[in-house]
Amino acid sequence: MPISGKKYHRRSLGENHDMRPETLMMGYGYDPSLSEGSLKPPVFLTSTFVFDNAQHGKEFFELAYGKREPNAGEESGLIYSRINNPDLEVLEDRLALWESADKALSFSSGMAAIATTLLAHLRPGDVIVHSAPIYGGTEYLIRNILPAYGISSVEFESGIEHYTLEPALNEAQGKGKVGMIYVETPANPTNGLVDLQECARLADALAAKQGHRPLIVVDNTFLGPVWQQALAHGADISIYSLTKYVGGHSDLIAGSAMGRAEVMAPIAGFRTILGTMCSAHTCWLLMRSLETLKIRMERSAENAKVIAEFLQQHPKVAKVHYLGFLPKGSDAEAIFKRQSTSAGSTFAFDVVGGEKEAFALLDNLQLIKLAVSLGGTESLMEHPYSMTHSDVPDDVKNRLGMGESMVRISVGIEHVEDLIADLSHALDCM
Ligand SMILES: *Cc1c(COP(=O)(O)O)cnc(C)c1O
């Protein structure tokens, strides 16, 4: 059954040369001959798809609702854009390449990806064990929404020196069946890390005890997919806010989740019913973004390194929480080197002083914009204590090391000397 605009899946050149994801982003999963020769995939702005005949319609629905197994080589045809759409399919095939996932799904936001994944895999009585700090929206979902559905939680701190996963798992077992270990590594804005191999080892041990292996779900937004592939290090599901680095231009909201076919199937089913899929137009924008993902992430990481070094020697900066500065020989450094190939380009630093000094710095920037979010081509700065992490109780913020003197920067792809000149001037104004 030809799916319009799809079906071109060459991943290797000759016998033993597999192409890299950055090469495949320009055409993988799309056959121009199915779309009037159009070099780039059109935006399929349609709610519904016309069946060739009634028998096809019947067969498509049988597959879409899992009423029978597909015959060899049979793929479900297109029915309705809440269920599927060519732009979603091509985008998802390309996203999956970055982590060698069987299947990627795209969503209307990072939070839609997270919520759909959690609802698809957790049941009343389950306990979710999660790292802290985590993204505010995820924290709200786990703390304020899921308990009404009988799903409770236990948190553990990600860390630079050590972290507390094992005691948290023990506590969780007293509350019910541990359904999921949910991790953000590195954490925002502290850069606390979690050892994913350790998560996998503890999940295996728990499987023997409770007869169910908790899924390991990693929010890989900060370093993925270029600098960290969560699936390769033991995660079952890798989640992204595509709004950040993958979208990369601060002009869209989207998310994704990827993993093995059997863990993605229930999520796909929930997405169809909840209607949390990505729109065709946003998928098209994301395909355009994916073509430059690697060079954008490389350039911003290069800039970030120069900026982190500049800040570290500045007399008005007390501490730079940059992954490239982890103590030599520490456990954190070992975890970082095993799991990631770059320190990325979003990090926090503490100014000398408190809120007054941090605000003076932010208010005197001329090039760098004062805004939340991250991962775009332009550099952004914000004050986690009063902005992105405003909702976190003050004692928790202080315990986790995100005080009023902390500011966060997402470094973009501008000329690095322009960024340094802006920071230098604003620091002088403090
Ligand atoms: C932004 C973000 C999210 C939420 O993504 P949206 O696209 O805004 O819904 C989740 N996790 C992390 C780490 C984020 O930075």
Image (cartoon, grey):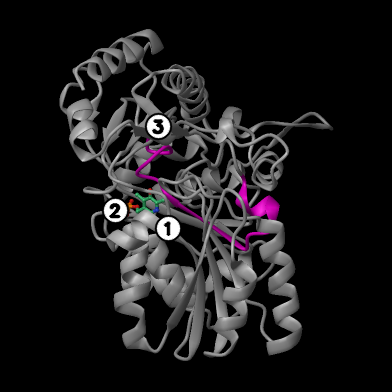
Magenta stretch in the rendered image:
229-248
Left or right of 99, for residue 118: left
Count residues near mark 2 (Cα–Cα under 10 Å), then give few for <14, some for 14-19, many for 20+: some
Whether residue 316 is situated above or below residue 280 in the rendered picture: above
- Residue 115 lies in the magenta-colored region: no
- What type is the residue that disc 1 sits on? Pro
Q: Quick one: label 2 or label 3, which is nearer the N terminus?
A: 3
Image quadrant in which the N terminus is located: bottom right
Residue designated by label 1: 133
Q: Contact, CB < 8 Å: mark 1 with mark 2?
A: yes
Q: CA distance from mark 1 to mark 2?
A: 9 Å
Residue on which the image places disc 2: 389
> In the image, residue 239 lies at what x, y percent?
49, 56
Q: For the residue marked with disc 2, what is the amino acid?
A: His
Question: Which element type, helix, strand or loop, lies under badge 1?
Answer: loop
Q: How many marks?
A: 3
Q: Is residue 102 left or right of residue 258?
A: right
Instruction: Tell which circle, 1 or 2, labels the residue nearer the N-terminal end.
Output: 1
Q: Quadrant of the C terminus?
A: top left
Could you tell me which secondary element the residue under label 2 belongs to? loop
Q: Is residue 26 depicted above or below 210 in this figure?
A: above
Residue at 22% across, 48% down: 387
Q: What residue lies at 75% left-to-right and 77% top-to-bottom?
A: 205
